[in-house]
Image: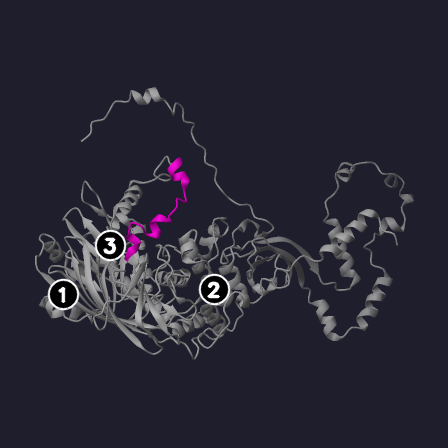
Amino acid sequence: MRLPIGLAALCLTFSAFGAEPFDDKFRQLDELIPTGNAVRNAAGAPGHAYWQQRADYAIRATLDEAKRAISATETVTYHNNSPDTLSYLWVQLDQNVFAPDADARTSSTITARDAWDKGRSADDGVHFETMRSLLENRSFDGGFNIAAVKGADGQILKFTINKTMMRIDLPQPLKPGAQVVFAVDFSYKINNAKIQGGRTGFESFDGDKNDLFEIAHWFPRMAAYYDVYGWQHKQFLGAGEFTLEFGDYDVQITVPADHIVASTGVLQNPEAVLSAAQRDRLQQAKTSSKPVIIVSQAEAANAEKSRASATKTWHYKAANVRDFAFASSRKFIWDAQGYKKGGTDMMAMSYYPKEGNPLWEKYSTQAIIHTVEQYNKYAFDYPYPVAISVNGPIGGMEYPMISFNGPRPTKDKKTGALTWSKRDKYGLISVIIHEVGHNYFPMIVNSDERQWTWMDEGLNSFLEKLAADAWEENYPKGRGEPRAIADYMRSRNQVPIMTNSESLLQFGNNAYAKPAAALTVLRETVLGRELFDFAFREYAQRWKFKRPTPADFFRTMEDASGTDLDWFWRGWFYTTDAVDVSVDGITEYGVSSKNPEIEKAWKKAQKDAEPVSLSEQRDKDTARRVDAHPELKDFYNEHDDYTVTNKDRNKYNEGMAELEPWEKALLKQGKNLYLVDFSNLGGLVTPLVLEITLKSGKKYIERIPAEVWRYSSKKITKLIVTDEPMVSLTQDPYWETADTDTSNNAWPRKITPSRLELFKTEKGKDDLMKDFRTPLKATK
């Protein structure tokens, strides 16, 4: 057969290209994650050959308040538990991020040029604080001064500093199962955290001329060495935080005699540094039902009035921690309360200057205990003896057993009155929950923060939401609600969650909010709470005091829930696809009863429901010949196409006689069938959550798993069966899937309400003459 030219060309086109490439959103993650092995098995658990290194520290440090400097000697015992022989060691020098030639400074770029070029207000311009920080960091002589590195025998060891990393060359290779001891003498200047930023530093108080020190990243720390990455010696640029080895710490900190020191670990010499009254109050706090004041505001205020010339040494020990931090000031008020339940037996303690009250005295220690109560439900019993919250210059930062948190009330400069906003109050509670919660992730479940920020911040933000929800009803929503991430997911300025920490765009949304929202979707919509909570707790239990990778998390959640979630990890974590499901249309079908009395009446009703044409409307009163001459009417004027004939009835009766009883019953059910067309416009496959409204007004939810998209990830048709006619359908009625465009979620479409603002025209706005003649106000 000869084809028309156009049709022949069309056929050639199809034969040349074939079907569209199939985008399988449900293919397994095999090409993206490592194959399971003896160290990390395919179920997501530590394998029978799992190993990790260990580093124990003994540190003797002095805080020079006048010079705002730290000097110290540390002795490190490094245990090589790996199967590898090591000829050198890598040590983190994170204070070098403040060195003049630090990569963090020299590689920084300006991401918002408009703020420099076109800034016209406080909202879109460069602030004084920003310029001050920029200039201060350029002139600050920060970073470690490494005086010496020595072996256990006192001999000098060769070392090489590469910015924020130091390589120590060993005199003999360190074999598997062996250990090496070395010592480092070091010092550095402490940065002004209120001006220069960072995760550590001091704050100076103009009113009483005292300083408050929050000290972290303050000693050379062993870089992690592990099976997946080898040495984790990626440079510290400021965003990607830390991955460290567990060990025991014995730390002595010499400070001015009138200082109070809050620290990782347990105080070993309370008789030497605390008064008898303070020791008695601490003993009382262990069994108290509310926080007990250890150092009162009056006592702290009195200490602020002078400076001690003598010193005291605070001795702390901490077992099986991955880091060590402390805070020191004579300004500290101190309260504490014991908490003991299950496997947790600890002291919750808060340290804060008077500038933090009354908020801190009211909320801080209570928030610590609340965090431990809630996180214990979803992870494991808090294993450490203390949990501390310190108010100082750092807005929010975590270390083992201690966290630095920033919010304070606002003091009126004229009246001295203290006030705080709703945001201040709940911001304080939330940041304490978040930072204390970091004890679980990553201080105990020890993920590689330098590589994957989401593994600690995302998981912790998710648990923070659960803890906040348990604080009070209608707690102000933060990260974790799927609806709150929709704007970010529709934006162009984003990268996948599985992007290295230093390369993230929109850091807060990517590393905190999106993974937290993803886990909420997984818990509430995909798995359900029972399956999710069991699997998440299994992950925490498997990997506490060990170092998991993303693959270990993904595999454990699938293994313990019994659910293939590769589609979920791929879409949410490896792409920037968004959820946007459109309800394109609905076609209604009824099951034919085959009864001509019913079916022809139904067809007639459908015909009668069709719109009357405009011509017919206008011809309604037109004179008709058959009306004037009724003799012209016959059978067909009395009957139409919907008249039931005896032939119809005979055919029906004959057909019914051939049916089985169950087939007859099926015809009588009277179900309503609807074919609903959906489009996946965002690219991210998702469960369908359908709210169906029936003619009677009854509403119900039908939940359809994401696998509905497995044969076609772009367009699908779903059959919906109802007992009575359906009048409307809404996809994602509770906004639980982070759908980025809810305007296309309903059928029939809903009108989107909004408001139009009208503004008065401003005349004479740019009147230079008027501005020039404005009287000059007197200045103070």
> Mark 3 against mark 2, which lies toward the viewer?
3
Question: In the displayed image of the protein, which residue is found farthest to the right?
Answer: 631
The answer to which of 162 and 40 lies nearer the viewer is 162
The residues bearing labels 1 and 3 have C-alpha atoms spaced at a distance of 20 Å
Residue ID for mark 3: 201
Tell me: 37 left or right of 721: left
**Quick check: 514 above or below 754?**
below
Range of the magenta residues? 95-117
Q: Position of residue 259 (x, y in %)?
A: 14, 59
Give neighbour class at mark 2: few <14, some 14-19, many 20+ (Cα, 10 Å).
some
Q: Position of residue 517 (x, y in %)?
A: 45, 59
In contact (CB < 8 Å): disc 3 and disc 2:
no
Residue ID for mark 2: 524
Task: Tell me the number on the disc at residue 227.
Answer: none
Q: Quadrant of residue 520?
A: bottom left
Residue lying at 87% horizontally and 52% vertically, measured from the top left: 2
Q: Amino acid at mark 2?
A: Glu
Tell me: 681 left or right of 640: left
In contact (CB < 8 Å): disc 1 and disc 2:
no
The residues bearing labels 3 and 2 have C-alpha atoms spaced at a distance of 41 Å
Q: Quadrant of residue 540?
A: bottom left
- Disc 2 on helix, strand or loop? helix
Residue lying at 76% horizontally and 55% vertically, measured from the top left: 603
- Disc 3 on helix, strand or loop? strand
Residue ID for mark 1: 313
**Quick check: 274 above or below 416?**
below
